[in-house]
Structure formats: structure tokens, C-alpha cells
């Protein structure tokens, strides 16, 4: 799975409807929100990228899915069987996708 596919599947897993997702010209994903995130003036389309800290860390808190490093320096998240990834954000995103 590439990064855009992970972001798309994560958005669907956390409750966005398929019609609220749009692929950007650069291959990324945007989501339509009825409320504006902090720092934005109006509701509308917002970039959704699991690699962005403002996207992934609220998901970590909401789903209680804190990543950690194992003894082999791989990021681990989720419940057994665990998800292993090369970054903390990717481990969390894949764990939430798997759980939902």
C-alpha cells in the first residue's frame, strides 16, 4: 500500500464516508469536514495525510493506539497480532485500519 492508499483507508476506518474523500492532483487525499479545524476560518476540504502529526496524533488518542519501539527498533502499534512499521504514524494508521 502506498501512502495515499493508507490515508484513504484510514479516513474510511475512522468514519469518513466515501463521498467525503477526494484525491488531490498530487495523489494525496482530502476530506470534507462540516466543522473547520482549529486555525481555519471556514469548513470545507482539508488535506488528510496520516504522516502529518496534526492528523495522526488525535487518532492515537481517540483509539488508544500508542506506538512504541520494539527491541529490533521497529515501531509497533495495536493489539496482538501487532502491526510493525518503519514509522510510528504508519504503525498507528495500519493498526487502526486493521481494527476497523
Image (tube, grey):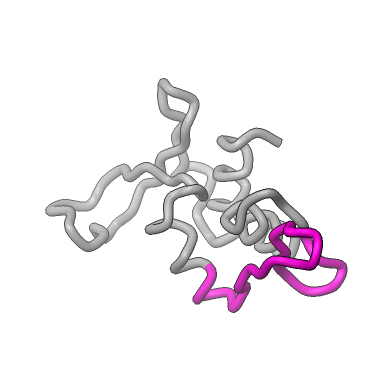
Q: Is residue 41 above or below residue 57?
A: above
* Rendered view: 67 above or below 50: below
The magenta span reads 60-83
Residue occupying the point 60% across, 73% down? 66
Residue that appears at 47% across and 32% down: 28
Assess whether residue 71 is covered by the magenta stretch: yes
Res. 54 image quadrant: bottom left
As drawn, 3 above or below 82: above
In the displayed image of the protein, which residue is found farthest to the top? 25
Residue closest to the far right: 81
Q: Report the residue at 50% width, 54% height from top.
A: 16
Is residue 35 rendered magenta in the image?
Answer: no
Give the percent coordinates (x, y) of residue 21: 47, 41
Residue 63 in the image: x percent, y percent? 58, 74
Could you tell me which quadrant the C terminus lies in?
Answer: bottom right
Closer to the camera, 67 or 24? 67
- Residue at image position (78%, 74%) is 79
Q: Position of residue 53 (x, y in %)?
A: 42, 57
User: Between residues 87 and 4, which one lies in front from this camera angle?
Assistant: 87
Q: Is residue 45 left or right of residue 16?
A: left
Comparing 21 with 39, the one in front is 39
Figure quadrant of the N terminus: top right
Number of labelled discs?
0
Would residue 31 appear left or right of 18 to someone viewing this image?
left
Task: Locate residue 94, reporting x and y percent.
Answer: 69, 55
Amino acid at each position: 500500500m502506498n501512502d495515499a492508499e493508507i490515508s484513504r483507508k484510514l479516513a474510511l476506518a475512522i468514519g469518513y464516508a466515501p463521498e467525503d474523500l477526494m484525491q488531490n492532483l498530487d495523489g494525496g487525499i482530502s476530506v470534507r469536514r462540516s466543522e473547520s479545524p482549529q486555525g481555519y476560518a471556514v469548513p470545507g476540504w482539508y488535506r488528510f495525510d496520516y504522516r502529518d502529526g496534526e492528523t495522526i496524533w488525535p487518532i492515537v488518542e481517540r483509539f488508544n493506539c500508542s506506538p512504541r519501539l520494539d527491541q529490533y527498533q521497529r515501531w509497533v502499534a495495536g493489539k496482538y497480532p501487532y502491526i510493525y512499521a518503519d514509522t510510528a504514524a504508519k504503525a498507528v494508521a495500519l493498526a487502526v485500519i486493521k481494527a476497523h
